Every structure is written in structure tokens, then in C-alpha cells.
Image: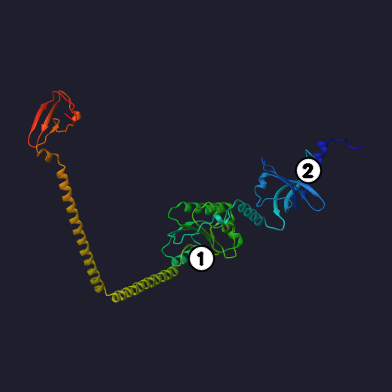
Amino acid sequence: MAEVISVSALNRYVKMRLDADDVLFDLALRGEIANFVQNARSGHCYFTLRDDACSVKAVMFRSDAARLAFRPQEGMRVVVRCRATLYERDGAFQLYVNAMFPDGMGAAQLALEQLKEKLAKEGLFDPEHKKPLPAFPQCIGVVTSKTGAALQDIRNVIGRRWPAAKLLLCPVTVQGFEAAQQVADAIRRLDQRRDVDEIIVARGGGSREDLWVFNAEVIARAAFRCKKPLISAIGHEIDYTILDFVADQRAPTPSAAAELAVPDRAEQKRILLELQQNIRKNMQNRLDLCYNGLEQYNYVLEQHLPDRLLQKNAAALQQLQDSIRAQLREKETDASRQLQHAAVLADSLNPYRVLARGYAMMTTEKGKILSEGALQPEQTVYIRSASRRARCRVEAVEELNENT
């Protein structure tokens, strides 16, 4: 009869046998991810790896998951490096995954596509965020290697097209582990300078791996936050990076970026010459119009003989003046006659003329004429004649009738 053992002993024995098998200690398995969950607190990933017939549970601890270059998704086919053993507490056979790669697509490319999708959803590629390039920049910031061909290409093109522009180089490493952070920091430093009008981020041609650093999220976000217009010029015409989608302008080469950044001196000269010719032409047209108008006025003056018109109008004016003067004299005579008549009438009504004929009138001390109804006994009045005045005192006032 078999020895009776505990469940714990059984699980411990099976785990020991599995761990002792070198084949199970380092496996490379291909399968499809199902039921993928990443614990928010611990960071560990739990999922099932399955094929058409079977499935097995798997776990990937946080330290290994942090090295993933892509985001595992439900239904994704992957290849995992792992060890197979028994989870002793539950008696569950499972995989402990230490590395994972997309099956059929490179991890880096998958990570790139996922980053593009993430940034696009956040609006970093939207056209409404693109800033126009300045028409006549005075200072251009350049982010590139100080020893690379890209810098020399930019210098040559700008020196030929618009030598008035000043170049301000912020040298960086354009490949390697530290390159992404250096490029992002350089963009921020140039953006903070007041004298910089626009920024060119450039790198010469190279392999796809050489240009991969410009797909970094830190560079994309630095370019999006940049307030100065930014031109991306990475690699050759067929090469595209994340930075190209975020930048305000994308140039296929560093030389093309320099052409976008500054105007063409020869073209500007041609435009100025054309403007000068148009101005001269417009001025000549205006002079011609003025000359033609002057000729018309001369013709009108000759036809109407100004001297004759002046003489005719002068005679009419003299006649009008004579008529006005006659009317004024007549009105003056009538007014004088009326004034004399009014003076005679006024003189005849002058009360002092009546006094000259022997009459007198009673007044107050201040000369106000008193009517008969104003007389009162004991009142002092003044009797006024033509040349004398007498002060009198009224003793009594008597009413007179017509027969008295």
C-alpha cells in the first residue's frame, strides 16, 4: 500500500521535480495573450498564454514588465522567455515570464505605433496646434550634433539664401541612450531665449536604428510645448519619426529645413524690383492722368476766353451796384421824411410845450406828475410852470361839478 502523504508534500515534490528539469527552467514559448491584467498596486502582470488547443497561466513580475518595449494587449501573439513550475500553495502549474516579444512584429515598431496612437489621441499631431514660420527670422536655434554634416548643410544653405540670419547652435548627441533627453533639454533652452525666432532640430541620414531616438516621447512633448516655431529635419526624405508629426513643419533633409526657415535673398530681390517697377508705372500713370486733365482745363479756358467773361461780369456787377445804391438812397429819403414827421408829432405832444403857453402841472418832489385823484389834504405838492416851480401845501380838496 502506498505511503499516505499530505497535499503540501505532494505539491512540494512536484515543484521540486519541475524545478530540477533544465528544459522547463528556460523555455521559449509562442502563444496568444488572453485575460491580461496588470495589478495597479504591485505592477505585476497576470495573463493566460494559449494556442488552438491548450492554455497555461503566466505571471510577469514588475521588474521584468518595466523592461517591456511595448504594451501587451488582449489577443496579441507573442514569444515569451520563461520557466515552468508549480505554484505550491494552489497546486497550479504556471509560467514565470522574464521577457516578452511580439510575434511577427518587432517590439520597437509596435511600441512606436502605440506611442503614435497615444500622442494622436492627446492632440499632439492636430493641425490647429501648428505655428506659422516667421517670414524674416533674425536668429535661428539649431539642435544637432556640432560635428555632423547636418550643421554644415544648414550653414551653407542659410548663408546662401539669407546671410542676415544668425545661427545659435545647441549641440547634442543625436544617438545613444542619453540623446533623447539632451534633444528635449536643448529645445526647452532655445525656446526660453527671447532672441530665437524659430528652431531647427536636425540629424543627417542613417539607418532606421540611428534615427530611432527621435521617436522618444520626451522629445515629442518638448516639441509640443515649444512656443517657438519648430522644424523637424531627421534623416532622408523617406524617413519619418514621431518628432516629424509633432513639429510645426517637417523637412525631408536638413538642407530643406534651412530653405524652409529663411526666405530666398534672390527671390526677395526679384519681388522688390517688381514692386519698384509697379510703383514707377503707377506714378507715370498718375502723371499722365494729371497732364491730360491739365490739357482739358487749358482747352476749356481758351474756349471761354476768361478776360471777356470777366469784363462782362464786371459790367453786370457795376450795374447791380448802381441799382443797389439807388434803392438805398430812396429808402434813406423815405426814412428821413418819416423821422421828421414823427419828430413834429412828438414835439406837439410834449407836455412842456403846453407849459410854455401859461399852463402849470402838479408834481411830487421827485417830479412825478400827480393826477387830480391823487390830491390829499395836508399834502405837499409842487406847481411846475415852464420856468418856475413852487412848493404848496394842500389845505382842502373840493369836488367841482360842471356848473361850478
* Kind of element beneath mark 2: strand
- Which picture quadrant has residue 275? bottom left
Q: Residue at x 10, y 27 (%)?
A: 392
Foreground pick, 309 / 202: 309
- The numbered disc on residue 363 is none
Q: Residue furthest right?
A: 1
Question: How far, Cα to Cα, is label 1 from label 2?
Answer: 61 Å
Mark found first going from the N terminus, 1 or 2 = 2
Rendered location of residue 6, percent (x, y): 84, 35
- Neighbourhood count class around disc 1 (C-alpha, 10 Å): few under 14, some 14–19, many 20 upward: many
Q: Quadrant of the N terminus?
A: top right
Rendered location of residue 255, percent (x, y): 51, 65
Foreground pick, 233 / 152: 233
Q: Is residue 44 left or right of residue 347?
A: right
Q: Which residue is mark 2?
A: 86
Q: Residue at x 33, y 74 (%)?
A: 296
Q: Which residue is mark 1?
A: 255
Foreground pick, 153 / 331: 331
Q: Amino acid at mark 2?
A: Leu
Foreground pick, 25 / 296: 296
Mark nearer the viewer, 1 or 2 = 1
Q: Residue at x 68, y 57 (%)?
A: 106
Q: Height in image: 380 above or below 184?
A: above
Q: Residue furthest front?
A: 403
Rendered location of residue 250, percent (x, y): 55, 61
Q: Is residue 200 left or right of residue 372?
A: right
Rendered location of residue 366, percent (x, y): 14, 32
Q: Amino acid at mark 1?
A: Ser
